[in-house]
Amino acid sequence: MQIIEYKKCRGEPLWSPIRRKNMQKIELLAPAGSYEAFIAAVENGADAVYLGGSLFNARASATNFSDDELEKAIYYAHLRNVKVYITLNILINDDEISQAVDFAKRVYEMGADAFIVQDLGLAFVLRQVIPNINLHLSTQATVYNELAINAVDNLNFERIVLARELSLNQIEKICKVTDKEIEVFVHGAMCICYSGQCRFSSLIGERSGNRGKCAQPCRLPYTLLKNDKIVSQSYSLSPKDMCGLEQLPRLIKMGVCSLKIEGRMKNPEYVAEVTRVYRKYIDEYYDKNQLSVTEKDKQDLAQVFNRGNFTTGYFLKNEGPALMARTRSKHWGTYLGEVTDYIPKRKLVKIKLDNDLDMNDGIEILNKELSGNIVTYIAKEKTQIREAKKGQEVWIGDISGKIEKGQKVYKITSKILNEELKESFNGKFYKKIAIEARIQIKENEKIKLQIKENNNLVEVESDFVPVVAINKPIDKESIEKNLSKLGNTAFVLSKCEIELDENLLVPISVINDLRRKAIEKLEEIKTNVNVTKEYNKLNIKLPQKQAVNKKVSAYLYNSNDLAGLEEADRVYVPIENYNKLINVKTQEIIPYVKTITLNNTFSEYDFDKVLVGNISHIKEFEGKEIYLDNSLNVFNSYTCEYLKQFQVKGVNLSFELNLEQLKAIKTDLETEVTVYGYLPLMVSEHCVIGSEIAKCINCGLCEKDNYYLQDRTNRTFRILTDRQNCRNIILNAKKIFAPEVVGELENVEYFRAYFLDETVEEKKEIIRLIKLGKKTSCVGYTAGHFYRGV
């Protein structure tokens, strides 16, 4: 058999083309933390799947993918018109840059469609070394306005993943003013902290979210203290999961490119169900220009995972208390009914059902023990049954604990739903791509078969030449029947055109052979890795910084009191206090703007220098002398080198770097390291104080008293509030104090002290000890990450 041609279709096709509906249809992007979850995503309608390799991704505890599995996944996805995005979305230190680049090269050559990146230094390197690579800027980069997008324009990110804290109005505004693809999270778990800004797990548990190892301390219970008095006890940092299903029409209309489902740590059943439901309603909206979500689909979404129902996140408004799952932080399941009786000795619980129940469902009773089990016994009156319906009252067996009448019961897992979902990824590979066939069979000419799928066209011809049949000539029915035998391939025949001369002899084996060859060539086209292996040498020359004079900077969290700071070389003050200090001549005073400055304006302030907390501020304060705070997560020398092109004078290096990593930083920017004070753990759009006490926002309570969160080990974390917008900043329970590192870090010029409520004398002593640069006998402090890192 001779292969005539296989190519991307250009010009006029040989028959009327399939018209692709909705060419710019919004992308559904699903998560995969395992190969099984990946199959679940593809088979249930994802347009793209994001997943991580064994290195450098923000879900280090997921199963993740070996290189062989990555290659296999990319092949499987591309065959089915699904894209694969690789997560490289953590901070990278200097020693890891070359390894990260090598990994990116390997997966790029496998045909990965894009790489999701947090670290600007890594993006800078990848853009130089692999110029044709597609990069997406991760939500970990804390992008919340168009200024941030403009600031990184020269890194040529194809797509920007926005912060989850944005409203629909804010997202729409960004979509209108940028030509970048915009991706938003639409379903799944929400972090209470802006992504990329959380150091809670890092500082209290040595597991950094910025390194893919978050231990989720936000899902633990806390006690809210007003001064030293208990106000409430709850899961006050644990949001409900978001569900943006009802917001699909507006997200589509405003021009969002991709809808992202959270869940690389979730099981394949979750991935299957959430992907299936969103696929269904995206298609419904495009087909009917309207949306009507059924109660069953809402119920099934909740069944696979929810934390006390769903929230729309910040899409519509800041929901305050309604955002939170205050009473428990784990999966709730769906409401099953209420306990009406209990026989402890027999471990039998009677439940009045508000939902159907089946054998092998998982249930949980809401009490302190969360009593529950897999259901292995159901009885109505004295008859054992395998299923029970809503409205019935039944006995459930083998349940023990402190169970009382009136307690609520939840169905945590549904055996029937899970079995249905597993069928979508159990190896039968149900997703099929429609193809069209055209076959030409003429006397004394080689048979020609064309297969077309979207813009892919394959043409093959046979070595066999048909002749007039003596008996049993081939007919159109048998030709179409055998062209349709596509078995376990990814294809299904949707249309077949047959041009057949009469009374010809053609063995069916010839038709089958043509079909196999054509399908093989079509698979080859669809999975062909057609990337430009154009690599540049890493040609970013890093400067060798010389030893510098040591100076002390003081950062005032919430005051403009300079008393006790006379020996500090520089003082950072809140920008709202700057005008009161503009005439101070004794030392350098620099105003700072907080990490998140949505809806803030600064035109009333007159300053030449500014300390900024977000990449957007580089654009916002163009023309000023800019210093970058640690919230920009500068983790390596390449980030410093990238930032030099802006008017950046200095940078406060990430306090997640250890001593040796700090020494390895090569830059001629002015560098600063924090050695004293309460480090910021979180910045959150949610106000814990207003949510827990006033049940609203803008309550003003934070102006009257000090508030703290206390964990199970009695550590107390101070809550600061930005009164302009009620954002919370949560501080570490312990102060860092490590003056001894001053002498070791020859390349660092400034050593910062955070001051909150220290006395004048304490400030003076802290500054004196930092300038001495010697280890002290002070107790009750932490050395942060200087001697451990992340």
Image: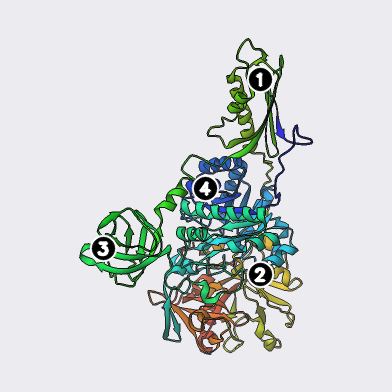
Q: Is residue 401 above or below residue 594?
A: above
Q: Position of residue 721 (x, y in %)?
A: 56, 81
- Viewer can see residue 584: no
Q: Quadrant of residue 715?
A: bottom left
Near mark 4 (Cα within 10 A), the count class, few <14, some 14-19 or many ≥20, is many
Mark 3 or mark 1: whose residue is earlier in sequence:
3
Which of label 2 and label 4 is nearer to you? Answer: 4
Q: In this figure, which residue is indicated by the disc labeled 2? A: 650
Which of label 1 and label 2 is nearer to you? Answer: 1
Q: In this figure, which residue is indicated by the disc labeled 4? A: 38
Q: What label sits on residue 348 in the rendered view?
A: 3
Mark 1 or mark 2: whose residue is earlier in sequence:
1
Mark 4 or mark 3: whose residue is earlier in sequence:
4
Label 4–label 3 contact, CB within 8 A: no
Label 3–label 1 contact, CB within 8 A: no
Q: Quadrant of residue 441?
A: top right
- Viewer can see residue 365: yes
**How far apart, in angstroms, are the residues tagged by discs 1 and 2?**
70 Å
**Amino acid type of disc 3?**
Leu
**How far apart, in angstroms, are the residues tagged by discs 3 and 1?**
72 Å
Q: In this figure, which residue is indicated by the disc labeled 1? A: 462
**How far apart, in angstroms, are the residues tagged by discs 4 and 3?**
40 Å
SS category of the residue bearing label 2: strand
Image quarter of the N terminus? top right
Residue lying at 52% horizontally and 74% vertically, measured from the top left: 322
The residue most toward the right is: 11
